[in-house]
Image (tube, rainbow, N blue to C red):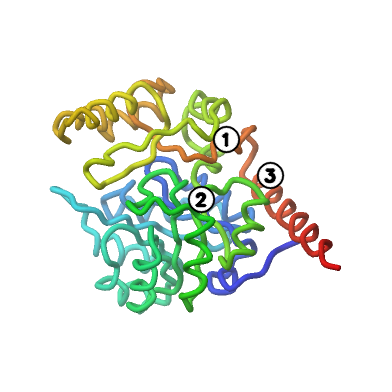
Amino acid sequence: MALSTRFTETFGVQHPIVCGGMTRVGTPELIAAVANAGALGFMPAHNYPAPEDLVKEIAKIRDLTDQPFGVNFTILPSRNPPPWEELMRATVESGVTAVETAGQNPEPYLPIFQGAGAKVLHKCTSVRHSLKAERIGVDAVSIDGFEAAGHPGEDDTPGLVVIPALADKIGIPFIASGGFADGRGLAAALSLGASGISMGTRFMCTVEAPIHQNVKNQIVANDERSTNLIFRQLRNTGRYAKNGVTDEIVRILNEGGTFEDVAHLASGDQGAIVLQTGDLEAGVWCAGQTQGLIFDIPTVAVVIDRIVAEAETAIDRMVALRR
């Protein structure tokens, strides 16, 4: 079975489910598994900052699937940014038909993508930013609720509010992110006006995810309280798994510390060590509140099939309530 929405029609996929771009996690093997299961996965371009390397990774995905997939461009301030425009052109010249943008305003880059026929999904954390994305011409929006891992914005608005608030105002398709890990969530998002969902933490806890088994096991062991919000004082809030490192960052900043006081703790290189070695206290690592909804480590195909089946059951149950 399949659930047809404006999102699935726009992006040419079977299921209204997205694996958003995840640094060091969204490898060709994971993205291809998502595509083969009928959903849409985005591989982060910044995982491969040399255009020729990105082209090779795109080719790897093509060797593993004949289904649609995408590339993520998370463009953030950097002292040494990758060659974004070269990476973008390499992506569309490789025939990729979907891109996910995040961070900076994507307007300058839309001609590169859309001029080559690619659809653009832009990640936002508020209704106002989503409406601006619509005005500049993106094809769809992904809206993060406060439950999301990574950077949920500064408004602290949960999905139960931000999804219908956006549905009331936007004209293009949008999907919801943050707090989704099962079919009940998909059915809820659809009922609130979204055209699908995006998940990260749930896809981390799959057989194909290229992270250490210790991390996957910890996600299963954790619950919905097992996150910390760091950098709140700096208005650059990030939701990460709760561990000794994120506890220490919160403590230092709560006591008036600066970014320089915690930069060594929040190092991306240290976070990579967690994912690679399974040392859960080596650094910070992303996980959302959906840890409280994850109880197993199945294949990607099982996750997606189960979510669709659960959503259909939930929808049928709601229809049966009518008298």
Sequence-wise first label, 2 or 3: 2
Q: Which residue is mark 1?
A: 292
Of circles 3 and 1, the one toward us is 1
- For mark 2, give the secondary structure: helix
Is any part of residue 96 visible from this angle? no
Disc 1 versus disc 2: nearer the observer: 1
Query: Which residue is pictured at 31% across the width and 44% down the height?
Result: 237
**Are the residues tagged 2 and 3 within 8 Å (C-beta)?**
no
Q: Residue 282, relative to residue 25: is it above or below?
A: above
Sequence-first tag of 3 and 1: 1
Question: Which numbered dot is residue 31?
Answer: 2
**Residue 120 in picture, x, y percent from top left:** 41, 69
Q: Measure the C-alpha gap from mark 1 to mark 2.
A: 24 Å
Q: Nearer the viewer, mark 2 or mark 3?
A: 3
- Is disc 1 in contact with disc 2, using a CB cutoff of under 8 Å? no
Disc nearer the start of the sequence (1/2)? 2
At 53% across and 70% down in the image, what residue appears?
11
In the displayed structure, 35 sits above or below 137; it is above
Q: CA distance from mark 2 to mark 3?
A: 15 Å
The residue drawn where x is 47% and y is 60% is: 162
Residue that numbered label 3 is attached to: 302
Q: Amino acid at mark 1?
A: Gly
Question: Is the N terminus in the top left, top right, bottom left or bottom right quadrant?
Answer: bottom right
